[in-house]
Image (spheres, rainbow, N blue to C red):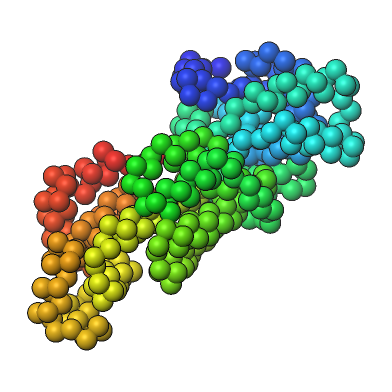
């Protein structure tokens, strides 16, 4: 094992302690930090999963995500610097969601009853003890770890869309999307904390969000195809958020429109990292909208309607005259009324909303500054950059470098 790779594992150990392995082309263990390596290697070999990994690695280079019938994951990466002797780097077993002892026991019983592997009662107890201590790494973080590990091993840059997946049986090896089953049981306390923040429009939501991320952001789902599952998880999460927002006073038609907008974004997402970013943005968006409803209780329905129109059409050219005509006001009266009720001129409110979206796109997407400028309907890239600098004190590119999300 190279010093660079060992150092990286040691860094990971400070946040998410993982078990790592090196196998040769015959599937023999070269090195590992696992204390009970014999039992875990047998579990990894069960149902010919290790054999499938070796076969895959002989013909492919991209990381392989392997989900077992026991509900845990293994990740395989391939060092082919010596073409005669492929080294298989494996991390795992690990989970991407919190699991209970009862669930582990049921999965173990189901697997052994299907003759996946014969295991004695003594070893079964040992496995249950081990399984309760398997590291849980949220999907978005695990994805980044895999990308970094692949780069350390191969010096090749990849994205999550390059991963291949093996789900329980060798014949399921595929790089295409498949079906998945949804288990919408978020850990109850984490779910309630998240939803209560939306109902209350609580802008101090960071602690609840961090706690939820530790048990997986979104809803708890069984392991299948990770990208499809992440999309399904996000869509279910969007439904929970919209219902909580309605409970908090957000008009139902607004909540459903926001939910539909983010559901479409989730379906269009290309990788799990992008989905995590959409989930985060959606959650914050719902909180901010409920917060606005609660704090702008003195805003009249016509002005609130104008604010919602601006929010939903912020990437379009918005004419104040059209806004005024839509609610039966003159342009002058609307401008005066809008500022007296909100404290902002209409143009300033539009600029703030555009800047908020620009910041999100800079940190959560790979869109170029020019594309973001065009998306927000600015007349030129330089004009957008000047406005952004006045707003943040940074150029768009500098802001991206300082605030980009993992």
Quarter-of-image position of residue 253: bottom left
> Residue, x 63% and y 47% (percent of image)?
185
- Please state if 304 lies on the left or on the right of 269 as rendered: left
Q: In this view, does 371 lie to the left or right of 230?
A: left
Say which quadrant the N terminus sits in.
top right
> Looking at this view, is 369 or 295 the one in front?
295
Q: Compared with residue 87, is residue 349 higher up or lower down, i.e. above or below?
A: below
Image spot of residue 299 (x, y percent): 24, 67
Q: Seen in the image, is 99 located left or right of residue 149? A: right
Residue 292 image offset from top left, x and y in percent: 30, 59
Q: Provide residue 389's location: percent of width, then percent of height.
A: 14, 50
Q: Say above or below: 234 vs 313.
A: above
Q: Where is residue 205 in the image (x, y as percent from the top left)?
A: 38, 43
The residue located at (68%, 56%) in the rendering is 179
> Is 301 on the left-hand or right-hand side of 350?
right
The residue sitting at 47% across, 28% down in the picture is 152
Figure check: 108 above or below 390: above
Residue 159 in sight here = no
In which quadrant will I find the C terminus? top left
Quarter of the view holding residue 394: top left
Name the residue nearer the viewer: 254 or 355: 254
Q: Residue at x 73, y 21 (%)?
A: 129
Q: Is residue 174 visible?
A: yes
Q: How many labels does the image show?
A: 0
């Amino acid at each position: 094992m190279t010093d660079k790779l060992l150092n990286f594992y040691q860094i990971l150990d400070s946040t998410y302690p993982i078990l790592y392995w090196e196998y040769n082309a015959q599937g023999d263990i070269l090195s590992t930090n696992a204390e009970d390596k014999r039992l875990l290697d047998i579990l990894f070999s069960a149902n010919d999963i290790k054999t499938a990994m070796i076969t895959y690695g002989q013909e492919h280079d991209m990381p392989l995500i392997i989900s077992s019938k026991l509900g845990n994951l293994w990740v395989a990466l391939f060092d082919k610097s010596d073409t005669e002797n492929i080294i298989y780097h494996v991390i795992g077993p690990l989970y991407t969601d919190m699991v209970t002892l009862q669930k582990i026991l049921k999965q173990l019983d189901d697997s052994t009853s299907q003759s996946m592997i014969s295991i004695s009662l003594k070893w079964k107890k040992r496995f249950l003890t081990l399984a309760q201590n398997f590291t849980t790494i949220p999907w978005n973080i695990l994805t980044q770890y895999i990308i970094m590990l692949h780069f350390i091993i191969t010096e090749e840059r990849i994205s999550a869309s390059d991963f291949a997946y093996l789900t329980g049986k060798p014949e399921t090896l595929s790089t295409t999307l498949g079906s998945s089953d949804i288990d919408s049981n978020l850990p109850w306390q984490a779910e309630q904390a998240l939803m209560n923040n939306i109902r209350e429009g609580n802008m101090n939501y960071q602690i609840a969000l961090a706690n939820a991320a530790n048990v997986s952001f979104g809803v708890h789902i069984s392991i299948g195809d990770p990208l499809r599952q992440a999309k399904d998880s996000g869509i279910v999460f969007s439904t929970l958020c919209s219902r909580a927002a309605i409970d908090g006073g957000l008009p139902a038609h607004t909540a459903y429109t926001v939910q539909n907008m983010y559901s479409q974004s989730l379906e269009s997402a290309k990788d799990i990292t992008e989905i995590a970013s959409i989930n985060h943005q959606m959650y914050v968006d719902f909180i901010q909208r409920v917060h606005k409803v609660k704090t702008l209780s003195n805003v009249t329905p016509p002005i609130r309607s104008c604010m919602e129109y601006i929010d939903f059409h912020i990437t379009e050219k918005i004419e104040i005259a059209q806004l005024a005509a839509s609610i039966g006001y003159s342009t002058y009266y609307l401008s005066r009324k809008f500022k007296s009720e909100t404290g902002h001129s209409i143009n300033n409110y539009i600029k703030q909303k555009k800047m908020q979206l620009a910041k999100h796109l800079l940190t959560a997407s790979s869109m170029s500054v020019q594309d973001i400028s065009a998306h927000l309907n600015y007349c030129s890239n330089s004009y957008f950059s000047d406005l952004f600098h006045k707003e943040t004190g940074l150029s768009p590119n500098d802001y991206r470098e300082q605030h980009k999300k993992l």
